[in-house]
Amino acid sequence: MTLKSSRHGGDVFGFSPEERNKILDFSININPLGLSPSGRKALTRYWEVETLRYPDVEERDVKGALSKAYGMDKDTISLGNGATELMYTLLHITKPARVLVPAPAFSEYRLSAEAAGAEVVSFRLPVEDHFNLPLDEISEKMGPHSLIYLGNPNNPDGRLLTREEFHCIMDRARETESLVVIDESFIDFAGDPCSYRQECRSYPQLVVIMSLTKFYAVPGLRIGCSFADPQLAGRLNDALIPWNVNGPAQLYMTEAAGDRDYIEGTRRFVKEEREWLAGELKKLPGLTVYPSTINFLLLRLTGEIKDAADLQKRLLPEDIFIRQCGNYEGLDNSFFRLAVRTHEENERLLASLRKVWKE
């Protein structure tokens, strides 16, 4: 096996097809329960129909389903080929003078800003301060017509945005006529009360973006959504290319968004499994496990093994793949991230880690 670097870290396509198909990939944070049963049933029955015709360019059924599921009006919703397309398109149409980016955070925040030709300014989320937002620094750096990205919860640390932080930043955004973009790609694992999408009704300068591929387990189909003031949502919809969300993706999400047993079952399972996995990982010496609210854990090597790249190499013979986090701004090579997978798969991970620790 060989390793291949990626701006998102885990890239199993750097392996041969034989190796790729037997790897347990803990670098991607996808619902461990797999597809929604309702969504799978619809896909199985109608995949050929949806593949043989153009998708609905107005995305009526899926927007209706998302409107009902998330309690937001249809005219606030935009759909993208994943959350990333919405980020790039939003930056293109709003043309902010400056983009503020947290560090560590999802790499596409910075990359979308650079693609739009904006000045990019980062602010650190200090590890020693539990990744809290530096509100004074943000206020100082948020000049006129800026845009700020925030993760709720943030990737890779899993920390949720507090209400105090939210209102402080929104007040500053109003003063500077700036835009606040909250990435809630993992919020469904934490639950609706943790989301800020309803605040779009009160703040026209707020956009909440979600990847729907994580919780609903369809990264290969590609679908994301955003919520915004209807006027801004209309501009975003006009700028997106036609048929950017394919028919099978629309069909699946139309059914999956209303699959309450799947949604509630996922939240229960992930919470219980995350807490159990974190507890077992804490038993390993020389390993710091950071608290999380969702389906992944950030960890730091503090013992004899100090480099996550070294740990990744040691785990590859066990067909285990982890996410090094040294390429996140603000983190060094001692950090890595693990997805919460099924109990059996998590036990296999732990067994492999214990084996490495004994070597």
Image: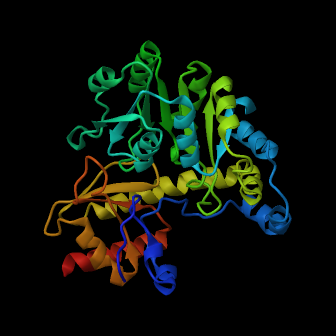
Colouring scheme applied when the structure was drawn: rainbow
Along the line of sight, the residue nearer the viewer: 302 or 334:
334
Say which residue appears at 34% left-offset and 84% top-offset: 317
Say if 199 sits above or below 270 in the image. above
Q: Position of residue 120 (x, y in %)?
A: 35, 36
For this rendering, which residue is in front, 326 or 258? 326
- Which residue lies at the image location 66% right of the left edge and 42% below the top edge? 240
Which of the 4 image quarters holds residue 246? bottom right
Residue furthest to the bottom in view is: 18
Q: Position of residue 211 (x, y in %)?
A: 57, 48
- Residue found farthest to the front: 117
User: Quick one: which residue is furthest to the left in this view?
Assistant: 304
Q: Is residue 38 left or right of residue 113?
A: right
**Residue 73 seen in this snapshot:** no
Instruction: Give the left or right position of residue 161, taking residue 307 as reference.
Output: right
Residue at coordinates 61% horizontally, 38% vertically from top-left?
Answer: 226
> Position of 122 compared to 31: left or right?
left
How many marks are shown on the rendered structure? 0
Q: Quadrant of residue 356?
A: bottom left
Residue depicted at 13% across the width and 69% down the height: 304
Whether residue 207 is visible to the viewer of this picture, yes or no, is yes
Residue 90 falls left or right of residue 294: right
Q: Position of residue 352 (x, y in %)?
A: 33, 78
Q: Position of residue 296 (x, y in %)?
A: 42, 56
Q: Is residue 177 above or below residue 239?
A: above
In the rendered image, which quarter contains the N terminus?
bottom left
